[in-house]
Image (cartoon, rainbow, N blue to C red):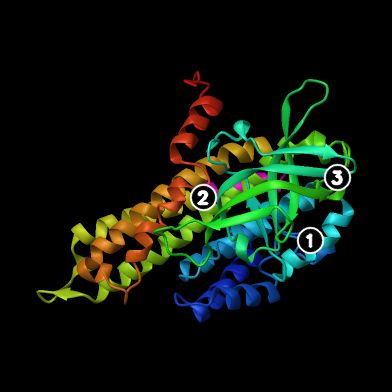
Amino acid sequence: MTLTETQEHNSLRDAVATLGARHGRDHDRAALWAEAGKLGYLGVNLPTAYGGGGGGITELSIVLEELGAAGCPLLMLVVSPAICGTVIARFGTEAQKQEWLPGIADGTRTMAFGITEPDAGSNSHRITTTARKDGGDWVLTGRKVFISGVDIADATLIVGRTEDARTGKLKPCLFIVPRDTPGFGRRLIDMELHAAEKQFELTLDDVRLPADALVGGGPSHAFGSGGEDAGLLQLFAGLNPERIMTAAFGIGMGRHALAKAVAYARDRTVWKTPIGAHQAIAHPLAQAHIDLELARLMMRKAAHLYDAGDDVGAGEAANMAKYAAGEACVKAVDQAVHTLGGNGLTREFGLASLVTASRVARIAPVSREMILNYVSHQTLGLPKSY
């Protein structure tokens, strides 16, 4: 892979940065989403045959990073085009692709992603949402928590489990559940974090779905890449982009906070000297910049591997990128607030809200401790403690 970005990528960065600057910190989420979709940024990773830009997660991560750096990140970019769009593009039936991808690409349709459960947490092997066959239909039962943007999504891609008739074991499958499906309920979770995208608890009370709601359709599709026999493959194909995009989210937020701190440190004068001239201020800001750049390099590696079809290599790099970006984001925001002092806690400068928001990059979609588990087991070959 090359360490320098192509001219096309530079042009994409500039164009998205211009869009972000126009909308800014006090943006209207719906208006920004609609314009980004109209300009082709939301579906830049999706196939051109379905209205996308024909790029990959590399391009989509640039879009999210630059919007975040402008102070207007779109969290649903992580979910709708990155996870759901990718899964459907790679594993969906032709009918599913035709139905969902054009709308996801231009922003007129949005999809949420439901995997986390109250008792499963980071252990996706303990998912208890089950799907059973009833004639030609599927019937889903279960609960999900901390599901983003369900109220603004046309459907939710639900991770459930079906029973293998041969072994009696449960295996994962993904289902497209339209928002108004009978039995599909949602409850708003009261969060201290104030974000445009709300968090919900979902209940699936005997939700009846047609056979074609199963991603990939049937027992097997496209040489085993879809349907009942490929749920685990589909799941991890969506989780790697999720981690890469979360890294982009954190890097963009960190850049936004750092830019505010640097501008303040240049202008704020005490005893006839800008405070940015003092190493006690300058060095921590320089270190924050270094950490963000290192995280960006790992994110670009992960995106390159994923777009090249190396799911295994991308899994390792995506986890590392998410970890590095989460740490860099939190440190950059903390140092930015500290640089501004009391002003860092005012609404005028818009940094105080990032103190809470930056923690999201550490916690979701997987905690830093679980990433350390992954690296210690998968990369270093150390034994598990669980």
Is residue 290 covered in magenta? no
**Three-letter code, disc 2:** Leu
For label 2, the crowd category at 10 Å Cα-Cα, with few meaning under 14, some 14 to 19 and many 20 or more, is some
Q: Position of residue 301 (x, y in %)?
A: 58, 46
Q: Find numbered disc 3 in the image and state the secondary structure of the residue it sits on.
A: strand
Mark toward the viewer: 3 or 1? 3
**Label for residue 297?**
2
Q: CA distance from mark 2 to mark 1?
A: 32 Å
Residue that carries the numbered disc 3 in the rendered image: 137
Total residue callouts: 3
In percent of width and height, residue 332 lies at 35, 57
| Most foreground residue, 255 or 5 | 255
Q: Identify whether 177 is placed above or below 123.
A: below
Q: Identify the magenta region.
A: 297-309
Q: Residue at x 27, y 68 (%)?
A: 344
Please tell me whether mark 1 sits on a helix, a strand or a loop.
Answer: helix
The answer to whether residue 305 shows anywhere in this view is yes
Image disc number at residue 100:
1
Name the dominant secondary structure of the magenta segment: helix
- Kindly identify the residue that appears in the image at 81 percent across and 34 percent down: 229
Residue 306 in magenta stretch: yes
Q: Residues within 10 Å of mark 1 (few under 14, many from 20)?
A: many
